[in-house]
Image (tube, rainbow, N blue to C red):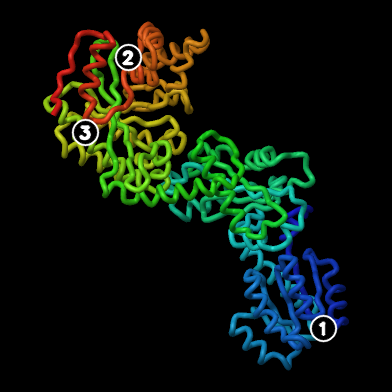
């Protein structure tokens, strides 16, 4: 590895020789004068333990017979306080029997004899350093640490003795579930190892580790730079490859990043990592591609999340979920085009919880698989109650999460649902978001084609906020595009924003798709969208999402009061 000052120098190989004979220590220093390792010496076990408290040591080589305690006793203590350190005895032959006993007890890994052969001792220490490196590095060439080694370093006083302009940063790779399905657990681990920057590109990130096969964790030393934490983290992210190739397929990689500042009294490395992970999770929840710094209030938020997660585990069994329905109005026929089913959660112990708060938790936990299946079944059951004989009537729309779409049993579950309920498949519409297409688009397109083969309609939700392009849209087997409310709400503010909405509608029609505008709140927006040829309108101008018991009456009022026509909703209110 290339030598470099800073935090990384503190995990360079350090070999500590312990002996109560000064002549022995002087000879050791002469022998290792040209060594690539940092050599420390101690004249007894007390001095050695003080050094170990201050410095992460790679290899300890101790004499056996010393006044205060034996080498075996010292190395047994080293095993407890520095479990990753390689422990060796360098002593006379008369100590061999006692040292073999220490080896059998696991306190010592090797026994070397005095007088030593210089070349043999150099080889032994080199081999010991390689063993130490295998214990702390996932990849030695990249200086990619494992989690245990990083935590041990942060627990030592070395980090706190550096200038306080240090931060611990956690970087989570998005959409790992899809990669793991393709590569397997071991393949994903190898991919993340390859994804890590090389040692030469770490720049301010003097240490980088791979945590639990999912997250990277780094320590950034800002003391000798003009960078703030955010700019230094961006330099680190720039060192990661943007579009790595996996199985001959290019993947767009994105990250969620959180960090915590290291204070002079931060002695708990695991707590530092957990706090940085909390900040990272907040960044993931915000979905805004921002770097989030840890704040103590996040612990309270995490406490609430833990309570929500515990409640979600039993919410389905306790029947705490309900569906609300927001109508969609067809402008050309002045009639009900359909509705979107939206899940609501009223927890027995917490009360009402916003979908924006609990849906991400179901995604992370995997509960979205079963909950999403319940939503589809419940929505279809309700819809066939309202429209029992309809073959070409209004359609019911259900949002599908990325986790559901990547579930190997998703198609089987969907087909079973269609066979269970008397609904025409074309009256069920699954809404997917653009962001789903970022990871492994080829596989997802194949799944969507299978959905279409079942006769189910597909819609792109939040269109315009993701990664839209003509080539991207032309590949997707979708029927409908929903223009995101972030385009609709401000469209009357300027000619440019009006033109953008009109172009989106024209683009969708050119591709043979139906256009739905969501977030319509006033008559002026409605009139403009009608002029632009938008097909379907959804928003508070007509109705907010309402409970099933209110939907029929609310929709009838909409079609009458909003003067879209005299068409009455024919439906079975039962």
Q: Residue at (40%, 43%) from the top-left corner?
A: 363
Which element carries disc 2, helix, strand or loop?
loop
- Where residue 558 appears, as percent x and y from the top left, is 26, 16
> Which numbered tag is attached to residue 535?
2
> Which numbered tag is attached to residue 20?
1
* Alpha-carbon span between mark 3 and mark 1: 82 Å
Is residue 513 at all visible to an observer of this figure?
Answer: no
Q: Indicate the quadrant containing the C terminus: top left, top right, bottom left or bottom right.
A: top left
- Where residue 279 appears, as percent x and y from the top left, is 56, 45
- Where residue 232 appears, as percent x and y from the top left, is 69, 41
- 10 Å crowding of disc 2: few (<14), some (14-19), many (20+): many
Q: Where 12 sits versus 510, above or below?
A: below
Q: Residue at (32%, 36%) from the top-left corner?
A: 343
Looking at the rendering, which quadrant does residue 209 occupy?
Answer: bottom right
Q: Is residue 489 left or right of residue 68?
A: left
Disc nearer the start of the sequence (2/1): 1
- Where residue 149 appears, as percent x and y from the top left, is 63, 62
Which element carries disc 1, helix, strand or loop?
loop
Q: How many marks?
A: 3
Disc nearer the start of the sequence (3/1): 1
> Which numbered tag is attached to residue 380?
3
- 10 Å crowding of disc 3: few (<14), some (14-19), many (20+): many
Looking at the rendering, which quadrant does residue 90 occupy?
Answer: bottom right
* Alpha-carbon span between mark 2 and mark 1: 89 Å
Q: Residue at (19%, 21%) from the top-left corner?
A: 393
Q: State if disc 1 and disc 2 touch (CB < 8 Å).
A: no
């Amino acid at each position: 590895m290339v030598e470099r000052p800073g935090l990384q120098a503190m995990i360079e190989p350090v070999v500590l020789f312990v002996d109560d004979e000064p002549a022995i220590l002087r000879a050791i220093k002469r022998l290792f004068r040209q060594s690539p390792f940092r050599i420390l010496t101690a004249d007894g076990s007390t001095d050695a333990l003080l050094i170990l408290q201050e410095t992460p040591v790679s290899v300890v080589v101790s004499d056996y017979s010393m006044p205060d305690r034996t080498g075996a006793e010292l190395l047994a203590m080293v095993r407890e306080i520095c479990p990753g350190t390689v422990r060796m005895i360098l002593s006379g032959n008369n100590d061999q029997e006692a040292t073999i006993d220490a080896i059998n007890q696991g306190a010592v890994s090797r026994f070397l004899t005095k007088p030593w052969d210089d070349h043999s001792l150099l080889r032994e220490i080199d081999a010991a350093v390689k063993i130490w490196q295998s214990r702390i590095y996932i990849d030695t060439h990249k200086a990619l640490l494992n989690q245990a080694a990083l935590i041990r370093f942060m627990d030592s006083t070395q980090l706190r003795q550096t200038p306080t302009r240090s931060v611990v940063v956690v970087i989570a790779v998005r959409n790992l579930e899809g990669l793991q399905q393709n590569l397997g657990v071991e393949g994903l681990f190898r991919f993340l190892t390859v994804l890590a920057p090389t040692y030469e590109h770490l720049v301010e990130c003097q240490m980088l580790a791979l945590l639990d096969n999912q997250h990277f964790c780094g320590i950034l030393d800002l003391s000798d730079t003009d960078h703030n934490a955010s700019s230094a983290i961006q330099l680190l992210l720039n060192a990661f490859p943007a579009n790595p190739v996996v199985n001959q397929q290019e993947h767009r990689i994105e990250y969620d990043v959180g960090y915590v500042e290291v204070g002079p009294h931060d002695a708990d490395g695991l707590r530092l990592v957990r706090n940085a992970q909390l900040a990272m999770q907040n960044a993931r929840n915000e979905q805004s591609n921002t770097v989030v710094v840890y704040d103590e209030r996040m612990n309270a938020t995490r406490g609430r999340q833990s309570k929500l997660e515990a409640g979600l585990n039993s919410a389905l069994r306790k029947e705490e979920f309900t569906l609300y329905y927001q109508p969609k109005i067809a402008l050309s026929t002045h009639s009900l085009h359909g509705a979107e089913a939206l899940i609501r959660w009223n927890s027995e112990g917490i009360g009402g919880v916003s979908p924006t708060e609990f849906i991400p938790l179901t995604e992370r936990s995997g509960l979205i698989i079963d909950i999403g299946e319940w939503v589809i079944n419940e929505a279809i059951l309700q819809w066939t109650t309202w429209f029992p004989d309809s073959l070409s009537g209004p359609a019911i729309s259900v949002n599908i999460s990325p986790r559901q779409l990547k579930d190997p049993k998703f198609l089987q579950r969907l087909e079973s649902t269609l066979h269970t309920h008397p609904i025409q498949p074309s009256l069920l519409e699954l809404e997917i978001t653009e962001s789903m297409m970022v990871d492994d688009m080829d596989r997802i397109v194949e799944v969507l084609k299978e959905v279409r083969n079942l006769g189910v309609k597909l819609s792109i939700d939040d269109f315009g906020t993701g990664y839209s392009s003509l080539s991207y849209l032309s590949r997707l087997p979708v029927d409908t595009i929903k223009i995101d409310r972030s385009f609709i709400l401000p469209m009357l503010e300027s000619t440019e924003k009006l033109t953008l909405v009109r172009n989106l509608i024209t683009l969708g029609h050119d591709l043979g798709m139906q256009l739905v505008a969501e977030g319509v709140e006033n008559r002026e927006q409605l009139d403009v969208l009608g002029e632009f040829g938008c097909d379907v309108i959804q928003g508070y101008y007509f109705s907010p999402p309402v409970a099933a018991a209110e939907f029929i009456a609310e929709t009838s009022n909409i079609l009458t009061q909003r003067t879209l026509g005299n068409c009455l909703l024919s439906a079975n209110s039962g």
